[in-house]
Every structure is written in C-alpha cells, then in structure tokens.
Amino acid sequence: MSSVNGFEPWVILLAGGIGSRFWPASTPRRPKQFMPLASSRPLIEDTLERAYAIAASSRVLIVAGGHLRDVIAEYLPDFPTDQLLVEPEARGTAPALAWAAVEIERRASDPARAVMIAMPSDHVIQPLNRFVATLERAITAAGDLGRLITLGIRPSRPETAYGYIEVGPATKAEAFEVARFVEKPDMERARKYVEAGRFLWNSGIFVWRPGTLLDELRTHTPEIAAELERLESGDVPGFFAMMPKNLTIDYGLLERSSKIAVVEAEFDWDDLGAWKAILRLRETDARGNIVVGDGVARDCDGCIIWAEDGPVVVWGVENMIVARAGGITFVAPIERTGELKQLIEDLPGELKKGDA
C-alpha cells in the first residue's frame, strides 16, 4: 500500500539471531528465519510477503548482521542490496532500530509523513488480510497520536515464554494506554494474567514515526542519545562501536518511556520460540507426530522428527524431538527444548556451530 490515512508506511525486517532455538537445524549461520518451520517456505519469505502487503517494495529495509549477508542473498536473491542494512556489530534491537529510523528519515520523500513498522522475520502470522487490517489501525494510531505503538496478542493459553502487556484505558485511534510491561512470568502468574483478561502478549512488532522514536531515544536512552549525532552524520561503524552489547528496544526504551500505546492484533501469531511450537503449526499424523525430511516414525506419539541430513528412524517413543542436521543428531524430550540455549552454551565450540 502506498499510504494509510495520509501516512507513508516503511517496514523494517529484523533478521538477526544466533540460531539457538532450533539447534542443530538452526545455527548462527542459518537462524530460524531461514528454515521452513511452519510450511514449505522459509519464514523470512513469508515475512517479506507480509511486508510488501503493507508498504511499497522500495520502502522495505532488512537489518541483519554481516554474517548473514550471503545467506540473505541466497534466500532472497531479488532483494535490492541498497535496502539491506548490514550492522557493523551486533548490538541489540535498540541501536538497530535507531539506525533504521535515521535511514528512513534520510530516504523518505516526506519524513514527516513516514511511519515505521518494525517486525521480526521469524514469526508465523495468519491470515494476511487481518494482519494488514491491524497494521492499518496501528499506522493511523502512531501517526495521529505521536506515540510508540506495540502490537499486543490476546493470549490463547498461559505462556511462560512471552512477555506481557497490561492494558490501560483507551486512547484515541483504537489504541490503549500501556499500564506496564511484565517480564516472562511463572506458570501461576501466567494463568492469572489470562484469567484477568487485561493482559496481552508482547508481540515484538512495533509501529511509530521515525522522528518520535529518535526523540524518545534522546530523552530516555542515554546509551544511544550520546551517540545519535554520530549516527546522523553517517558514521555508522562509529555509532555501533560505542553501543553496549544486547541493548534491546524493550529495556532500552519501551520500559522507560511514557509515550507508549498498544493496539490489539486481529491475527493469529506465534513466535516459534522452541521446537515444540511447530506442533501447534504443522499438520500431525494420526498419533500426533510431525515428520520433516527423510524421517520415519513407528509406534511413536507426539514426536517431532526433523531429518535434513540423512535418514532418521524413530521407534517406540513419546513426546521426543529427534533432529538430524549439520552433521549433528539431537534427541531430547520436547518439553525441555525451551532450555536449549543453556545446553548450547555448555557444548564444545564445534558442536555449537554445526555445518548447517
């Protein structure tokens, strides 16, 4: 779409990641957005399709680390290289989005009309028409209210892997005040949040005017404010060199600013946080198994068999993940895959990377 109520949408796809969630199939050289987890297509292709439904193709930018430049070229060969923003160093979402905002203001024909939509490239979102309708509301709210808008998801279950947003009073433009952000809760608190009815999952999808973002960073994020002039003058490497490691937009700004509002999403959403997530998304066999690639399940229940590196045969087990990729075979109870990051940190270096 070329405009929404007079505002010009720009989409920023965040395509970083260290590839730990779906190890060994995902690695630093192939994070999960390049995997066909929810369908036969890599997640990043689905994300780009959504981006083009919101904004003109010339107003879609991808932010990624240098180690992913060749991977992006392989999976998205037609994506223009001048729309790929390659981070000199990985420093978290706050510096990345600050850079993207500066780039939008530099490239937009009328920066005052630009509205920036930032979204991860590894989510599953359906259907497309309801996604577009939600974004139209969020773009209007960001433009009219001059606030930082986050999209909230109505919880379908108690979930300890997501952050939550407590919703406050209604504002104009179909948005709501944010009473507070809540870190990932334990199961007891997650159940209470769902029962209360006033909590939403924090989707990690954000909508705002680029100028509003930069103004709020100057006011509330001293880690970035002191170096914004460097960024705006074109010294991108110098800016990133001065940034602390892993400065997220949630901690660095959203939890500090009072200019936050939330728009509730109309679409179905999943961030694929661990192997067990694909049980929610892919069709299973009669016994609840999912088999991808050259795998065979016999007398199994509720298992995931992922075989992209030779045949895998699984027999007589329940609720297990058996994944073969990159020269590594991984076997674990599905319920423990949320702990995978800790396992990988404890592994020898050559196993962390695999060959994928």
Image: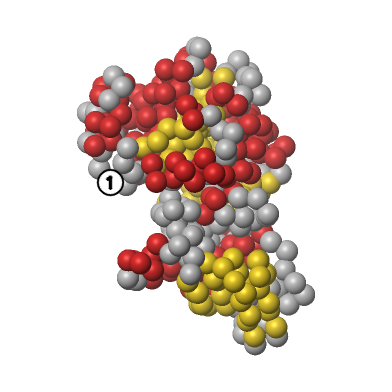
In this picture, is 234 found above or below 245?
Answer: above
Residue 211, percent from left and from top: 41, 21
Element class at badge 1: loop
What amino acid is at disc 1?
Lys
Q: Which residue is found at the position 66% from the left and 73% from the top? A: 295
**Residue 215, visible in the rendered structure:** yes
Q: Within the image, what quadrant is residue 58 found in? A: top right
Q: Residue furthest bottom?
A: 316
The residue singled out by tag 1 in the image is 245
| Camera-side residue of 34 and 290 | 34
Q: Residue furthest top?
A: 110
Residue 34, percent from left and from top: 55, 50
Q: Which residue is found at the position 30% from the left and 29% from the top? A: 236
Is the N terminus in the top left, top right, bottom left or bottom right quadrant? top right
Label count reads 1
- For the rendered model, the colour scheme is secondary structure
